[in-house]
Image: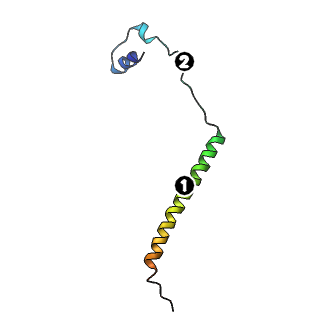
Amino acid sequence: MSDCLIKAFSGCACSPDECAQKPATPARVTFVSWRIQAIACLAFGFLAAIVSAAWMETQFKTRDLRNQEQVSWK
């Protein structure tokens, strides 16, 4: 079967009985429910929010440390 497909796409002709074979089982098609999609989307968003908040905290901390000598107290 795979040789027949390779021959068909490469321009070589197969014998008629070789190309007439069909796969024994059809390909499985799986559908993900909307609930699982929603849960995955919320989980990914929550994870992205935690990571970005941790990154912003380090950025603000280093910015505050850099700028602390420029603040004048009167």
Q: How was this image coloured? A: rainbow
Image: 39 above or below 31: below
**As shown in the figure, which amino acid type bears the numbered disc 1?**
Ala
Horizontally, is 49 left or right of 19 in the view? right
Image: 28 above or below 13: below
Horizontally, is 62 left or right of 11 in the view? right
Q: Residue at x 50, y 89 (%)?
A: 73
Q: Position of residue 9 (x, y in %)?
A: 37, 21
Of residues 66 and 2, the one drawn nearer to the viewer in this rendering: 66
Q: Position of residue 19 (x, y in %)?
A: 43, 12
Circle 1 sits on which residue? 48
Mark 1 surroundings: few (<14), some (14-19) or many (≥20) residues within 10 A: few
**As shown in the figure, which amino acid type bears the numbered disc 2?**
Thr
**Which label was assigned to residue 35?**
none
Q: In terms of secondary structure, where does tag 1 sit?
A: helix
Of residues 31 and 49, the one drawn nearer to the viewer in this rendering: 49
Q: Quadrant of the N terminus?
A: top left
Q: In terms of secondary structure, where does tag 2 sit?
A: loop
Q: Residue at x 56, y 53 (%)?
A: 47
How many numbered callouts?
2
Circle 2 sits on which residue? 25
Find out whether the residues at labels 2 and 1 contact each other: C-beta distance under 8 Å: no
Image: 22 above or below 31: above
